[in-house]
């Protein structure tokens, strides 16, 4: 398993009338977790697209809401890969408030698409080579 953790602060523009993180913005926090996890491997989404010609569209998104995140709270985003990517890659996310209480959890499934052909492809070796040590 490969795990990564990062933090982000709930901004005023992301909240609803009650001062809670608006439910539609949780997916953005998941994206922050995914992007930072990939970055921790020495890659970026931009690199994957520009240098390798690989896109990663979202296939499915699941989430559960446990308690609200509030304006100005520092949220910890824990992101895990529980299995080595093959045809797709599934990121599991948990968001925690400053007291360490679970706010939200879910998963996002993405596939790999060749930018030139617009066809799905297996997980690229430039990614799996970096992940392999975490799954041996």
Image: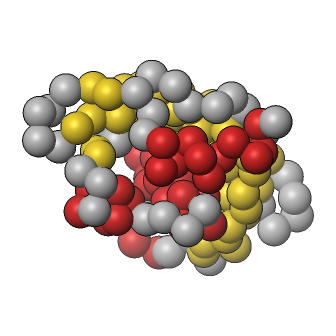
Residue at 65 percent of width and 46 percent of height: 131
Residue at 54 percent of width and 58 percent of height: 38
Query: In this figure, which colouring scheme has been used for the structure?
Result: secondary structure
Q: x, y percentage for residue 102? A: 79, 47
Q: x, y percentage for residue 107? A: 58, 33
Q: Quadrant of the N terminus?
A: top right
* Number of numbered discs on residues: 0
Q: x, y percentage for residue 129? A: 59, 47
Residue at 53 percent of width and 53 percent of height: 34
- Answer with the quarter of the image where residue 134 lies: top right
Vertical placement of residue 11 versus 61, above or below: below
The answer to whether any part of residue 26 appears in the image is no
Residue at 22 percent of width and 38 percent of height: 114
The answer to whether any part of residue 135 appears in the image is yes
In the displayed structure, does residue 9 sit left or right of residue 103?
left
The answer to which of 82 and 72 lies nearer the viewer is 82
């Amino acid at each position: 398993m490969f795990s990564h953790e990062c933090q982000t602060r709930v901004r005023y523009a992301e909240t609803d009338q009650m001062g809670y993180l608006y439910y539609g913005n949780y997916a953005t926090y998941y994206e922050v977790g995914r992007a930072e996890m990939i970055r921790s491997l020495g890659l970026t989404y931009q690199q994957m697209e520009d240098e390798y010609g690989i896109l990663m569209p979202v296939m499915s998104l699941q989430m559960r809401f446990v308690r609200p995140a509030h304006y100005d709270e520092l949220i910890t985003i824990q992101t895990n890969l529980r299995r080595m990517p093959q045809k797709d890659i599934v990121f599991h996310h948990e968001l925690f408030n400053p007291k360490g209480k679970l706010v939200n959890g879910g998963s996002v499934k993405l596939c790999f698409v060749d930018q030139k052909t617009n066809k799905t492809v297996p997980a690229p070796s430039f990614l799996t080579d970096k992940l392999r040590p975490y799954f041996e």
